[in-house]
Amino acid sequence: MIRGFLVRLGEGALTLLVIVSLSFFMQRLAPGGPFDHERELPPETRRALEAEWGLDRPLGEQFLGYLGGIFRLPPDLKRSMTRPDFGVTELIAPRLAVSLSLGLVVLLFSLVLGIGLGALAAARRNGFLDHAVMALALLGLALPNFVIGPLLKWVFAIELGWLPESRWVSPASMVLPVLATSALYVAIIARMVRSGLVAALGQDFVRAARARGFSERRVLLVHALPAALAPVIAWLGPAAAGLAVGSVVIERVFDIPGLGNTLIDAAFNRDYTMVMGAVIVYSAILIALNLLADLLLLRVDPRIGERR
Amino acid sequence: MRSAGARFRRHRGALVGVLVLVLVTMAVLLGPALLDRPPERQDLALGPTAPSFAHPFGTDYEGRDLLARVLAGGRISLLVGLVATLVSLVIGVVWGAVAGFVGGRLDRLMMRIVDVLYGLPYMFFVIILMVWFGRSLVNVFIGLGAISWLTMARIVRAEVAGLAGRDFVLASRLAGVSPLGALLRHVLPNAAGPIIVYGTLTVPRVMIEESFLSFLGLGVQPPAASWGSLLAEGASLFREYPWLLFFPALLLSATLLALNFVGDGLRESFDPGEARR
């Protein structure tokens, strides 16, 4: 198992390397660059700028130079090309911290609420509560967060004035973005947990537990729930990665200084070094969390290891 | 033992979903011809007005009829959903089937390529496409098509790899059926359930992604509209003119709900284990 994990780790590192190379060449071969402004620069200024950043050297050499920086400890992500007074690392770190903390809160909130609602629906299957929960979940799936976001902002921040409208100032400013982001995740988790539980309840090991006289609640939560959580964990890897790097839409709606918009802004400004920094952070998180989800899955359901 | 079709017809939610989809499709296809107001005709003197008899959905900031715009936008949103889903079906099924059936080194290589595309931030991909080709609907199609097939390929690969070693497939090979024949005649038909179910669920996912892109100004460009770009406009102006958010949101959500209902119905029809409650 450890050997399998090491192989996966190596594959992940290789995947990251390919992604970094692809992004590097994709943005460098695309027309335009960081020094194309509305106002045309004088040719000599432009040449001086390009020489300063090493953009006049062959592309392959620049690429190797950049890779050399990444593999240093601590990695050197260079300075931002549009804000040369700052290093890419120091620009990204605080935004990553915001996205990570927001993502973690959303994840915990969605897991607790989603598993709770899903278990409730399964316990009362085909009853009123089941239908109510599943109808709510469908609504969560069908309403995009850029509809939920402005609506929440309107009701709670503007009409009622209970919570700050936007800006990242206090823990209270986290409430509305967390709610707007969680709706979809709660819905997905509740549906997966419900259908997993309903499937598990029909299986022999659950019937055996019932036959031994355990209470229905205990059978549901102790015996059936772990089996029902396997698909949730498999889904959690990519979902958590998406949360960790921040939702572009939610960041726009609530004025959150997170990581999502960093990449978009950098790509629009053609800030080569910022784009690379954001891509590396984004892809590394995605790959790492997927690996973690695979490992967790092995612990929950050892049969998966044999099938590989 | 009833067939999947019969089980689907018993699923009331799914039937309502199909009905809603048919109605929405007919409305966006035929509606603009029946309305005598082109969606891009401005009436600056009129400006934004609340829903009325002349303009059932109201008008927007430039005095354009919102009903006409919502219907025209629906065409683009549905088209994007369908085209990207078809792309995901064709590429994803072929890719996943080849990887899963051939196995070995080719399988590993093909799935690593999927991993790479999956790990590449696709917003960045879309922006680079825009730099190359300018802002156009084609970029939306390419960008969404490029990511939407990845999950399909993973699902099909897992299904096909599981089926490829089964006795009935080996038996057909021993009986002289070519590898391609065995894949097409014996393996893929047995993987049809997950493919159809996931394909149905791809449509709403892609439609939401399109509306994200349009919301961020990366997708459909004015004066053309999609439900996403109308929602973006509505979200920024809805305090003064709530109908600008309400009607596009209503149409998009109803369509997404209907698609999810149909997907659920299909899943339960193809996987009766789950339907048995």
Image (cartoon, coloured by chain):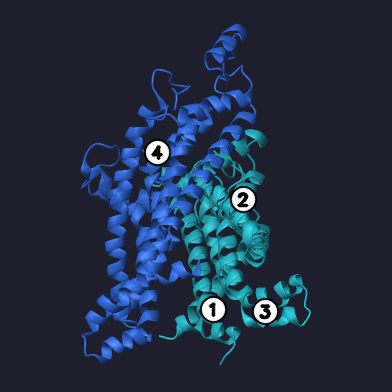
Chain colours: A blue, B cyan
Measured from the top left, where is residue B265 in percent x and y? 51, 77
Which residue is disc 1 drawn over? Answer: B15
Return the disc, 3 or 2, that comes first in the chain's sequence: 2
Furthest residue to the top?
A44
Residue B121 visible from this viewpoint: no
Furthest residue to the front?
A3
Tell me the distance, in whole angstroms, between the alpha carbons under discs 4 and 3: 49 Å
Q: Nearer the viewer, residue A290 or B47?
A: A290
For the point 30% across and 50% down, the residue is: A104
Relative vertical location of residue B259 with respect to residue A266 in this rendering, above or below: below
For mark 3, does the 10 Å Cα neighbourhood hold few (<14), some (14 to 19), or many (20 or more) residues? some
Q: Which element carries disc 3, helix, strand or loop?
A: helix
For mark 4, does the 10 Å Cα neighbourhood hold few (<14), some (14 to 19), or many (20 or more) residues? many
Q: Amino acid at mark 4?
A: Leu
Q: Amino acid at mark 3?
A: Val
Which residue is disc 2 drawn over? Answer: B146
| Chain that bears disc 2 | B
Tell if the residue under mark 4 belongs to the same chain as the one under mark 3. no
Q: Tell me, for residue B169, which label it has, or none.
A: 3
Q: Amino acid at mark 1?
A: Leu
Which residue is disc 4 drawn over? Answer: A259
Tell me the distance, in whole angstroms, between the alpha carbons under discs 2 and 1: 31 Å
For the point 54% across and 85% down, the residue is: B7
Q: Which element carries disc 4, helix, strand or loop?
A: loop
Front: mark 2 or 1? 2
Front: mark 3 or 1? 3
Q: Nearer the viewer, residue A247 or B242?
A: A247
